Image (spheres, rainbow, N blue to C red):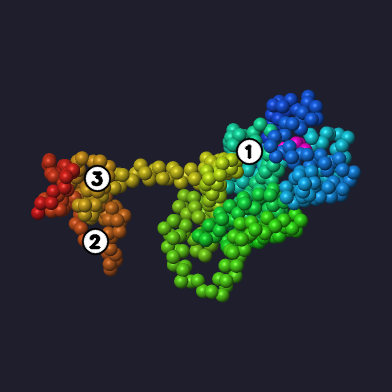
Amino acid sequence: MEEDMLIQRFAKLFFGCLAAVTSGMMYAVYLSTYHERKFWFSSRQELEREITFQGDSAIYYSFYKELLKAPSFERGVYELTHNNKTVSLKTINAVQQMTLYPELIASVLYQASGSEEVIEPVYFYIGIVFGLQGIYVTALFVTSWVMSGTWLAGMLTVAWFIINRTDTTRIDYSIPSRENWALPYFACQVAALTGYLKKNLNCSAEKFCYLLVNASTYTFVMMWEYSHYLLFVQAISLFLLDSFALAQTEKVHEVYKIYLFSLFLGYLLQFENSALLVSPLLSFVAALMLSKCLQMFVPHKENEHLLKFIEVKLGLNTTNGEPLKETVKLEDGRIGERPEIVYHVIHTILLGCLAMCLEGMKYLWTPYVCMLAAFGVCSPELWMTLFKWLRLKAVHPILLIYQIYSKRSAEDIYKILTSYKANFLVIEDSICNEVGPVRGCRVKDLLDIANGHVVCEEDDNYAYSKYGRFCHEIKMNYSPYVNYFTRVYWNRSYFVYRINTVISFQS
């Protein structure tokens, strides 16, 4: 039996990984084919090909060409760090100010791999871009897979990503723009962070996810000058996750340390780039880490009751960041025990707010909407929760209407019936006066138990409430029952009352 389960898990993992890699490769081929057919790239002269680079992509490609034309790589780097061609009458460090590490890496790979005799520089350059987009899609696939537990969600994410391709890039009519050199690494970081935040993760998987978060975060910082702003949004998401004890505090603070390490190393390797030292990410994370250190010396238990109250009100019932039970499912009503899901919800909302506030930022938000939508469609637990809610929604009105046989006030029954726009009330005397051989199984007994009106005393149970049983009391024709209901018909089996639209307060 165990061997069969092991084979099934291995087959699921194998086919899932195969689907993820295939999706990324197919998307890279799709982009390459789209680019070729749109610009007839292979039939153009070199200058005409370079003209197809739109916006800032053309500037960055020119630096790539300068590196290849330099007599040596060291000389090419020196010319970029002492560049006097980009800004008139001024010498700048182009590598630092324009974050030219993608071009440095591309030129090194082109020369070290001996591709000069095989492929033209421009094809090698755009080939890397398209390959990174394939990695981007693969990372989105894996993230959806980790969230939902099925690689079908990954397939849906890829499909919706391609359908909304125009909303996933700033420049649709050219090769992906500058930030798309870096976003694939951020997608890999998000995928690793999703796995790292999962509860009950085995040690080796957790360590692998941690190392991947380290590597991808640092690479992302080195690849894009605006990376720290996107990491700042992510840090806010993790802070909110930690504030409500929805994730293990130790894990969140380990990610904070990764941020600090990446910013420090990026500062050194980007020629002491001061922009990283004044970034909101550094200020925010440093403040959080400092507050953690202060909490070790300052008592804060007097504020714990407020946090617990907010957790209960929001349905985030956890204790000191630890799960209340080992097996967690969404139908239990505590989605807070799935920190990786809550993180994605918060992160997607924040990116959505960013997209609404800043024009042109929709390309950052769209991929994560696709992932959440795929998770919603493919998550078995979520569908079970939905079906359970629909079933309860269908049964709920009947249970409420049966409250006419319970020990509740005339006002309560009136509010229940008017909420469903009822005009008449029918009381069946056989239910109201039911005398069954087995106590506890009658309709009125079940209602008393549901309403908490059953009192246990000396091995005996009896119903107690400050109100009499409604179906009995209404027959007495005294206030307040006659204020809300008017009897219009009765016989030996049924009593029919009209629900008053205007309440009369007769004594």
Residue 235 appears left or right of 103: left
Circle 1 SS class: loop
* In-image side of 308 versus 219 (left or right): left
**The magenta segment:** 125-130
Q: Tell me, yes or no, whether the two marked residues, 2 and 1, touch with CB atoms within 8 Å.
A: no
Q: Earlier in the sequence, mark 3 or mark 1?
A: 1
Front position in the image: 426 or 157: 157
| Farthest right residue in view | 71
Q: Give how far across and how far down residue 328 sits, in percent.
A: 52, 54
Numbered mark located on residue 410 in the image: none
Q: Does 97 appear in magenta?
A: no
Q: Residue at x 52, y 56 (%)?
A: 337
Instruction: Count residues near mark 3 (Cα–Cα under 10 Å), then give few for <14, some for 14-19, many for 20+.
Output: some
Q: Which mark is residue 417?
A: 3
Q: Amino acid at mark 2?
A: Tyr
Residue 170's disc number: 1
Nearest-to-viewer mark from 2 and 1: 1
| Front position in the image: 284 or 378 | 284
Name the residue: 48% across, 71% down. Answer: 301
Q: Secondary structure at mark 2?
A: loop
Q: Position of residue 415 (x, y in %)?
A: 24, 48
Which residue appears at 27% of the width and 44% of the height? 419
Q: Is residue 32 left or right of residue 235?
A: right
Tell me whether circle 3 and circle 1 mark residues in contact (CB < 8 Å).
no
Camera sees residue 438: no
Q: Give, as a three-letter code, the residue at label 3.
A: Leu
User: Which amino acid type is marked by label 1?
Assistant: Arg
Query: Which element carries disc 3, helix, strand or loop?
Result: helix
Please name the residue that numbered disc 2 is placed on: 464
Residue at horizontal 56%, vertical 75%? 297
